[in-house]
Every structure is written in C-alpha cells, then in structure tokens.
Image (cartoon, rainbow, N blue to C red):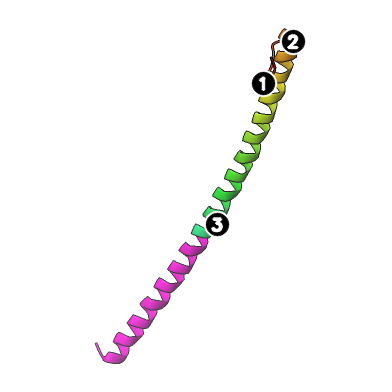
Amino acid sequence: MEWVQALTVIASLTAVIGIVANLLNKRIDDLRQDVDRRFSEMDKRLDRIEQDIREIRQLLYKIFELPQKGEK
C-alpha cells in the first residue's frame, strides 16, 4: 500500500468518525432536551398536586372544624 492510499484511508476514516460523532452528539442533545422537558412537566404536575392537597386539607379543616396550625 502506498502512502497516498494510506492517507486516503486515514482521511476517509477520520471523516466517517467525525460524521458518526456529530450524529451521536445531536442524538444526545435531543435526548437531553426531551428529558429536561419531561422533568419540567413533572415539576408542574407535582406543583398542581401539592396545591390540590392544600385545598383538600383546607376543606377537611372546614368540614371537621379542626384548628389549623398556628390557630389556638
């Protein structure tokens, strides 16, 4: 194998590895964005659940006429 052929093979392999690395990086970025979006949605849902629990607790205090914390 001549040195020109060796350089051609090395350049081709470098290009293929570069393309694969670029595609892999893009997939990782897409995955990261998807995970961030899902965590954001989960945070919103948890906030809504906490708010609903507070409202239920307040209604139960009113129904059973139990003093809330801090009231004596």
In front: label 1 or label 3 = 1
State the SS at label 1: loop
Marks 2 and 1, how far apart in space? 18 Å
Q: Is residue 62 left or right of residue 3?
A: right
Question: Residue 31 placed where, x, y %?
Answer: 52, 53
Question: Residue 1 placed where, x, y %?
Answer: 24, 87
Q: Magenta part of the protein: which range?
A: 1-27
Marks 3 and 2, how far apart in space? 49 Å
Where residue 8 sits, quadrant-wise, is bottom left
Instruction: Return the disc, 3 or 2, that comes first in the chain's sequence.
Output: 3
Q: Is residue 65 above or below residue 9?
A: above
Give the residue pinned by disc 1.
Answer: 70
Give the residue pinned by disc 2.
Answer: 63
Q: Amino acid at mark 1?
A: Gly
Question: Residue 30 placed where, x, y %?
Answer: 55, 57
Marks 1 and 3, how far apart in space? 48 Å
Q: Residues within 10 Å of mark 1 (few under 14, many from 20)?
A: few
Q: Is residue 6 above or below residue 49?
A: below
Q: Are marks 1 and 3 in contact (CB under 8 Å)?
A: no
69 vs 18, nearest the viewer = 69
Q: Amino acid at mark 3?
A: Asp
